[in-house]
Image (tube, helix red, strand yellow):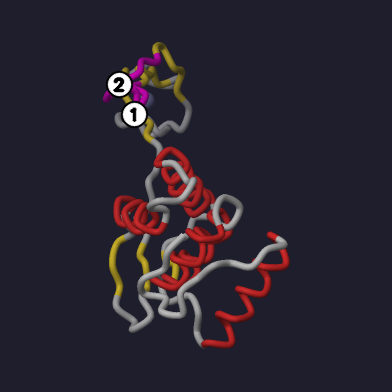
Amino acid sequence: MQCPACRHPESHVLESRSADLGRSVRRRRVCLRCHERFTTYERVEVIPLTVVKRDGRRESFSRSKVFHGLSQACEKTTVTPEQVNLIVEDVENLLQQRNYREITSKDLGELVLDRLGQLSDVAYIRFASVYGQFASVEDFSAILQLLKKRSGEALRLRPNLSTPEP
Ligand SMILES: [Zn+2]
């Protein structure tokens, strides 16, 4: 950290303290050249993420929106709100770690579905249909076949996907 007085690049940390309710660290430093004392703050960088929708519109990533959509898909299934929260957190962490600035709603949906599919087939189908993950009827049938194979049982689904029932 460059000294604000003489621009020397090296300083010595005298004291580190948690600040901003643990969201940052405050460090008291002394310049190794001119002995000027100064303070720095260290924070986790939160990269703003933009979601590009199918029609090209852009909006900021909203964890509450994903949580809400996911909760709806998981209604009356075995998936708990805690599990929903974990999926959202997991996806958000992954995007932060990979330094994503932008993601299509389709890719975002797939990340959620990867995790949801391990918990509930019904919630999976609901989320996928609501979020338009299926480009075509063929696409949808393929997913159904895959799920049937995996669970070894037929899924009881209504033909009308807008009102699926567990
Ligand atoms: Zn200095």
Determine whether, in the image, residue 114 is placed left or right of residue 2. Answer: right
- Residue 107 rendering spot, x and y as whole percentages: 50, 69
Q: Residues within 10 Å of mark 1 (few under 14, many from 20)?
A: few
- Residue 4 rendering spot, x and y as whole percentages: 31, 32
Whether residue 50 is in magenta: the answer is no
Q: Is residue 52 above or below residue 60?
A: below
**Residue placed at 64% from the left, 68% from the top?**
154
Quick check: is the Cβ at mark 1 less than 8 Å away from ligand 1? no
Which image quadrant shows ligand 1? top left
Q: Residues within 10 Å of mark 2 (few under 14, many from 20)?
A: some
Looking at the rendered structure, the kind of residue marked 2 is Ala
**Residue placed at 37% from the left, 46% from the top?**
46
**Residue placed at 40% from the left, 37% from the top?**
44
Q: Is residue 141 above or below residue 15?
A: below
Determine whether, in the image, residue 147 is placed left or right of residue 24. Answer: right
**Residue placed at 44% from the left, 66% from the top?**
126
- Residue segment shown in magenta: 16-26
Q: Is residue 160 above or below residue 99?
A: below
- Residue 127 rendering spot, x and y as whole percentages: 44, 64
Q: Which residue is mark 2?
A: 19
Q: Which residue is mark 1?
A: 23
Q: Secondary structure at mark 2?
A: strand
Answer yes or no: do the residues labelled 2 and 1 have beta carbons within 8 Å? Answer: yes
Which residue is more in the foreground, 97 or 72?
72
The chief SS type of the magenta part is: strand
Q: Secondary structure at mark 1?
A: loop
Dividing the picture into quadrants, the one containing residue 130 is bottom left
Looking at the rendered structure, the kind of residue marked 1 is Arg
Determine whether, in the image, residue 116 is placed left or right of residue 76. Answer: right
